[in-house]
Image: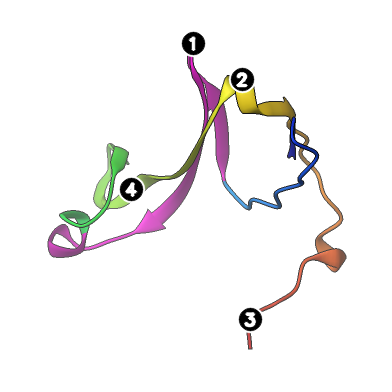
Amino acid sequence: MKLKNGSSVLLLADTHSETSTHHLFNVLADAAEEEQKNLHLVGTTPTNTERVLVSVAAFALEDVEDVQSGEDWKEIPKSE
């Protein structure tokens, strides 16, 4: 994602959507009910309430110049 201030953000997410004011990014994860209390949940799957969609980032539309997907995964550093 490229911001209007010239910065670039590499954000790994399962979903991207837009509201009238923000770009929203979410990931699909497994989380026990107790863990879910500490997350901003967007939803759960109908067949498994521990499979959840978690909101991980939001950027104001006015700050974002461009959002692209399909980055070259070889360029993304892996944690050790």
Q: Quadrant of residue 44?
A: top left
Earlier sequence position, callout 2 versus callout 3: 2
Number of residues whose C-alpha sits closer than 10 Å to that of mark 1, classed few (under 14), some (14–19) or many (20 or more)? few
Q: If you read the primary sequence from the N terminus, does the residue marked by circle 3 or circle 1 appear first?
A: 1
x, y (%) of residue 59? Answer: 54, 33
Residue neighbourhood size for the residue with mark 4, other residues' Cα within 10 Å, grouped as few (<14), some (14–19), many (≥20)? many
Q: What residue is shown at x 40% (from left), y 56% (from top)?
A: 29
Q: Which residue is mark 1?
A: 20
Q: Marks 2 and 3: which is nearer the front?
A: 2
Outermost residue on the top side: it is 20
Image: 25 above or below 22: below
Q: Is residue 71 above or below residue 17?
A: below
Q: Count up the numbered dots.
A: 4
Against 49, residue 21 (above or below) is: above
Nearer the observer, 56 or 21: 21
Q: Earlier in the sequence, mark 4 or mark 3?
A: 4
Q: Which residue is mark 2?
A: 62
**3D distance between C-alphas at marks 2 and 3:** 32 Å
Residue 79: mark: 3
Using a 10 Å C-alpha cutoff, classify the residue at mark 3 as few (fewer than 14 neighbours), some (14 to 19) or many (20 or more). few
Q: Locate residue 10, reporting x and y percent.
A: 71, 52
